[in-house]
Amino acid sequence: MLLVDDNEDRNTDVLPLLQQSVEVTVSKNNQSPGGILLYPDFTCIGGEYIVGINRKTVSEVLGDMDACRDQLLRELRNSPIDRLVLMIQGVWKPTASGMQVYRESDSGYQRQHLYHQPWEHVYSWMHRLWRIGVPVMVVPNMQALATAVIQEHEQSFRTDDEQVSIFNKLVRRKFYISEEDEKKRRFMLQLMG
């Protein structure tokens, strides 16, 4: 099951996209007593482990990186989730003056706002999150966000052994022919041209 905070349901069009692939329950995840956030915006429950996904727009992140980090740290500390992921939604581009943010429109991407944050500072911030165990994903739009959330949900149902097995199928192994097998070696070299 995928728990979706009711703020995400009200503020985005992601719910219909998610419901095409997974069972979704909308709840007031962030309405805990005392204002302590227990769950992120999306929570994958029922698999091998509980995955929490916090969605931020590029403008939210660039507008107050410290507040975003503090919220993630509170969720790590207070939540029963096993893994927390930050998904940054939007398009940004480093420039000489800072980070240019774009918004998607019917005619493509339009410049929206320039934040005077150097790319090195943003990258360092994301790297520090990775080091404390919060992977950071950047998705360009709502469709990519929904796809990434669904993939995180599906991955939460796989054991670590299954994930390693799938990864090993994707990694190409180098093929070696022993020096002793001269006949096979000549044949392979002939095939390779």
Image (tube, rainbow, N blue to C red):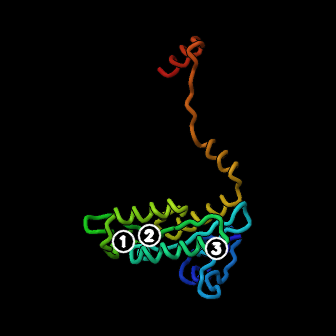
25 sits to left or right of 93: right
Q: How far apart are marks 2 and 1 (CA)?
A: 8 Å
Examine the rendered structure and indicate whether residue 15 appears above or below residue 47: below
Amino acid type, callout 2? Gly
Residue count near mark 2 (Cα–Cα under 10 Å), binned few <14, some 14–19, many ≥20: many
Among the 4 quarters of the image, the one containing residue 108: bottom left
The answer to whether the residue labelled 2 contacts the one labelled 1, judged by CB atoms less than 8 Å apart, is: yes
Q: Which residue lies furthest to the front in this view?
A: 77
Q: Secondary structure beneath disc 1? A: strand
Q: Determine which residue is flagged by label 2.
A: 90
- x and y percentages locating residue 13 in the rendered image: 56, 77
83 sits to left or right of 115: right
Q: Determine which residue is flagged by label 1.
A: 101
**Residue 177 vs residue 91, the one in the foreground:** 177
Among the 4 quarters of the image, the one containing residue 119: bottom left
58 sits to left or right of 15: left
Q: Which residue lies furthest to the right in this view?
A: 46
Dot 2 or dot 3, earlier in sequence: 3
Disc number lying in front (3 or 1): 3
Among the 4 quarters of the image, the one containing residue 159: bottom right
110 sits to left or right of 38: left
Q: Determine which residue is flagged by label 3.
A: 79
Q: Distance between the residues labelled 2 and 3?
A: 26 Å
Residue at left 61%, top 82%?
Answer: 30
Residue count near mark 1 (Cα–Cα under 10 Å), binned few <14, some 14–19, many ≥20: many
Amino acid type, callout 1? Val
